Amino acid sequence: MLHFRAAKSIGTLLCLGFLHINTTFARAQEIVVGDTLRLTLPEVEKMFLEKNLDILAERYNIASGEALVEQARKWDNPTLITDQNVYADKGFFQHGHDKNGAQQGQVFVQLQQLITTAGKRARQIDLAKTNVNVADWQFRSVMRNLRAALLTDFYTTAKLQAVGQLYKENAMRLETLLKAQEIELAAGNIARKERLRVQALMVSLQQSIIENEQALADAQGELKTMLQLSGNTFVQPVLPETEPANEPTITLLQAVDSARHNNTNYRIEEYLSQYSQQNLRLQKALAVPDLTVGPEYDQASSYTPNYFGLTLSLPIPLWDRNRGNIKSADYQVKQEDLRLRQAGLKLQNDVMSAYQKLLATVRLSTTGNTSFYTEYYQLQKNITDSYNKRQISLIEFLEYFKDYQNIRETQLQQTLQLRLAKQDLNDVVGVDVVK
């Protein structure tokens, strides 16, 4: 009697849990149905490029760098120096001529222009241009990383939706079975423990449904943020269920060579190394004194009433020869050289790793097992009827049910892994080498 009451209590709890979880799942499904935005991969990429604020903001770095290139081309402004008498012989600002026609009051005017030597301006322009190149590749890096995150969320959403549909179909089959079992239990044709096993399977399935919906909500949140969407809009990826198991169109060596020209992180390191070398040349040029030259005019303060002269100014490099900055720049060149070598080694290993992972994923692709999954799907649809007709036992029914769900989830996961493996290789190379 105690055992029967315990079983009855467990059954009641399972039923209550099933009803609560089923209601939650129904609400989640209602949200998906409302404001659904169906997008293909080209459409979602187009929207991403047009609306993503991170990309729009990053473009300003390039424009800012180009403005600095123009600024580096400009010459230094000339300097105007003047000196005039303010008070003399009880008079203020006495200039011009006295009553006898003689000049009175001093006027001194000098114009100076700085002329840089040793190609300093050209080197500063080179630095500014390299900064633009760094900003350009940083922009590409941001865009590539965001696009990778976009595709990951897009593909993950498609996979989670397919898993959700699988769970929903299985839940409907179990619900039909539970209704039939309720009648059989009332008639005394089955034991309560048999119904409890199916109810436990239903509760476990509904828990999987909730976890899947939570993961789907996370992927949707990130996807909508990158597409600048808000509210209850649901992005539904329009993708084929299977992914073609295509291998790269180039060899591994070709992929590494292509990556050296297109990988954003490596190209940034290249330009940073170039920047350090250009900075070293600039620091050496700064050790050469610059020349200041200009005309001057002096009235009434020299051996002649109107003096015209030419001024030349050249600092003597006696104490400061810019040696500290030159030495620091030289160390930076050596540092960036090591970083570039490290970046090259990492790039080669990353390409090799992504290339091999894709080949392994292609070999294990399930695209060639279409007939197997179709036949297993038909088998799974028939096991409920077979169980109701007592053609198979409860244990066999549970095993078939769980096996199909696991196999179907594996198929969807392998499709996702194949898509992500293609994406990873394309990202590390910097261009699409596999479709």
Image (cartoon, grey):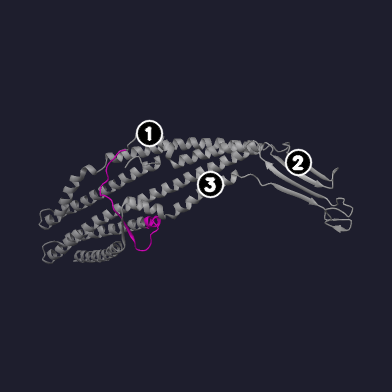
Which circle's residue, 2 or 3, is located before the other in the chain? 3
Q: Position of residue 64 (x, y in %)?
A: 53, 49
Near mark 2 (Cα within 10 A), the count class, few <14, some 14-19 or many ≥20, is few
Residue 433 or residue 87, whichever sits in front: 87
The residue indicated by pointer 3 is: 66
Q: What is the crowding at mark 3: few (fewer than 14 residues within 10 Å), some, or many (at least 20)?
A: some
Work out whether residue 332 can be spotted. Answer: no
Classify the position of the C terminus by image quarter: top left
**Left or right placement of residue 160 versus residue 380 in this view:** right
Between circles 2 and 3, the one closer to the viewer is 2
In this figure, which residue is indicated by the disc labeled 2?
311
Residue 105, horizontal then vertical, whole percent: 84, 52
Query: In the depicted view, which residue is nearer to us: 417 or 435?
Result: 435
Q: Which kind of residue does numbered mark 1 sit on? A: Gln
In primary-sequence order, the first of circles 3 and 1 is: 3
User: Separation of disc 3 and disc 1 at Cα?
Assistant: 33 Å
Q: Is residue 431 left or right of residue 400?
A: right
Query: Which residue was labeled with disc 1?
Result: 254
SS under mark 3: helix
| Amino acid type assigned to the residue bearing label 3 in the image | Glu
In this image, 55 relative to 106: left or right? left
The magenta segment is 221-247
